[in-house]
């Protein structure tokens, strides 16, 4: 497997919908669904070497360890190809600006997410070798 995909969000319904859309867009047939930041970080450290690259759909507002803390941890992973798509209900321009400060963030999407949003991610230049 070249590209591993994870959905990190505390909303189970969102996981269900994203799973369907990721399959429909042929981005991933089996995304890993994780429900909070700590769970993701544990999974990440156990599986980060299983693929050439990782595509992570990350919610910002989660209990305990939020998306910002996850991004801070991922920033330390300089040798790994990590692509993060922020998925959030926040429409605050400060959040979008802050997300731009993380080099692994390739997109910032405000919920609800649509198929066309995911197709744009699939067509984005940094990910092309992995599809």
Image (cartoon, grey):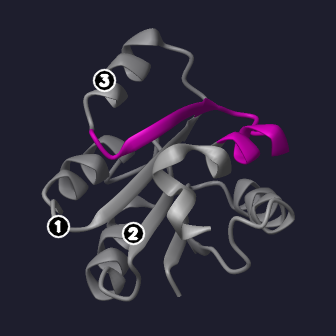
Q: Which residue is mark 3?
A: 98
**How many angstroms separate mark 2 from mark 3 (CA)?**
21 Å
- Residue 40 bears which disc, if any? 2
From the viewer's side, name the closer residue of 124 and 54: 124
Q: Relative to 97, does residue 117 appear above or below in the rendering?
A: below
Q: Relative to 71, does residue 13 appear above or below in the rendering?
A: below
- Say if the magenta span includes residue 84: no
Residue 34 makes an appearance in the image = no
Q: Which residue is mark 1?
A: 79
Q: Relative to 21, does residue 101 appear above or below in the rendering?
A: above
Q: Residue at x 70, y 61 (%)?
A: 15
From the viewer's side, name the closer residue of 126 and 32: 126
Residue 77 makes an appearance in the image = yes
Residue 131 position within the rendered picture, expressed as x and y whole percent measured from the top left? 62, 67
Q: Mark 1 Cα within 10 Å, few/some/many (few <14, many 20+)?
A: few
Q: Mark 2 or mark 3: which is in front?
A: 3
Among numbered discs 2 and 3, the one appearing first in the sequence: 2
- The quarter of the displayed image where residue 82 is located: bottom left
Find the magenta span and give its range.
103-120
**How many angstroms separate mark 3 from mark 1 (CA)?**
23 Å
Among numbered discs 2 and 1, the one appearing first in the sequence: 2
Q: Residue at x 63, y 74 (%)?
A: 31
Q: Residue furthest top?
A: 93
Q: Mark 2 Cα within 10 Å, few/some/many (few <14, many 20+)?
A: many
């Amino acid at each position: 497997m070249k590209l591993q995909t994870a959905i990190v969000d505390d909303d189970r319904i969102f996981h269900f919908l994203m799973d369907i859309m990721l399959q429909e867009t042929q981005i991933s047939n089996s995304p890993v669904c994780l429900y909070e930041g700590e769970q993701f970080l544990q999974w990440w450290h156990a599986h980060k070497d299983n693929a050439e690259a990782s595509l992570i759909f990350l919610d910002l507002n989660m209990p305990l360890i939020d998306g910002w803390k996850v991004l801070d941890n991922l920033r330390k992973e300089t040798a790994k190809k990590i692509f993060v798509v922020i998925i959030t209900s926040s429409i605050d321009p400060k959040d979008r600006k802050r997300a731009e400060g993380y080099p692994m963030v390739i997109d910032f999407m405000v919920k609800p997410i649509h198929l066309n949003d995911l197709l744009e991610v699939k067509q984005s230049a940094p990910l092309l070798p992995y599809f």
